[in-house]
Amino acid sequence: MTKTLSLLNQSIVAFLLTIIGFTITASTAYAFPSNSLRPGGVAVLSITPSQNAKPFVSYNSKPVALVKGQQNWLAVIGISLDAKTGQHEINITESSGKKSVQKFTVKPHKYKTQYLTIKNKNKVNPNNKSMKRIESEFVMKKKLKATFSNSSPKLNFIRPVAGRDSGRYGLRRILNKQKRNPHSGMDIAAPEGRSVKAAESGTVLWVGNLFFSGNVIYVDHGNGLLSLYAHLSKMNVKKGQQVKRGEIIGKVGKTGRVTGAHLHWTVYLNGNAVDPALFVAK
């Protein structure tokens, strides 16, 4: 029964991709993120170059993930949470040097507000020593998010841990009655020590401790697609290690700025944190 459902799901994915002009071979199954043209969403655009060779596609001067079909390519583009609504465009350069532009429209989207009380006041209003650490980490994180490996993107994501959604992506956060940056990922409440799995196969990009995020793991899934797992109590992997989808990489914890044990999960595309819910089955 499970195998039959899996084949049915693959058929549905193939059918939907065919509708937007993207064809995959029968031996290849992709679980593409949902096309969601909104701030914090994902644009999935079909590209048919005049030649079959892989084109170079950029959005806001950054390269974007490309997946090969039989006669075309599919660009999977991360839209930043602070993106302006209206017309956006990608730039396409073919192997022959021919250039073109393809446009898409980002529509308005309203995110809810979440009010939280943090007991550790230094995690809300950091002192001078903490601010120096935060500034240093900001530079490092910016560099990590800009990672763009040439390997084909792996998009068949699973939820990294079982639990209750306790903080959705994009929430406008009020911490101790003070406005802070919107939530950049998905929070999944789970008991401390519960196993956290890699959402997809990839290469461990960085492992360490950050002021706000606590113990974290970054995984590179190819072509600018990354995932971040934060607030961990234990980390079972090392930088440079190859991991497979579903492999246990750490344990749920409450390190960093938290109100309780949970996993904070972020997905990055071309440097932008996008809604992780778009990458997993409903």
Image (tube, rainbow, N blue to C red):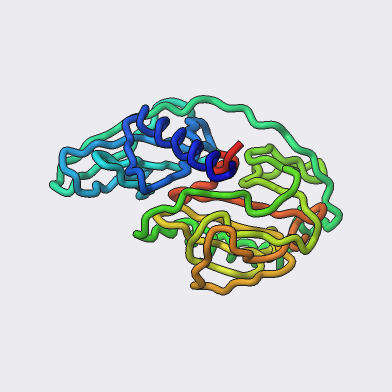
Q: Nearer the viewer, residue 136 or 37?
A: 37
204 vs 100, left or right, is: right
Say left or right for 177 vs 227: right
* Residue 21 percent across, percent down from the top left: 32, 31
Query: Of 279 and 18, which appears nearest the observer?
Result: 18
Rendered residue at 32%/43% (across/down) = 25
- Extreme residue toward the right, this view: 119
Quadrant in the picture for the N terminus: top right
Q: Position of residue 49 (x, y in %)?
A: 21, 39
- Residue shown at 35%/43% (left/top)? 26
Residue 74 appears in which quarter of the rendering?
top left
- Can you see residue 48? yes
Residue extending furthest left? 96
Q: Residue furthest front?
A: 1
Q: Is residue 65 above or below residue 47?
A: below
Residue 139 visible from this viewpoint? no
Q: Position of residue 198 (x, y in %)?
A: 58, 59
Q: Residue at x 81, y 52 (%)?
A: 259
Tell me where residue 244 appears, x and y as whole percent. 52, 63
Asked if residue 153 lies left or right of residue 206, the reply is: left
Q: Residue at x 55, y 39 (%)?
A: 5
- Depth check, front residue: 56 or 161: 161
Comparing 2 with 238, the one in front is 2
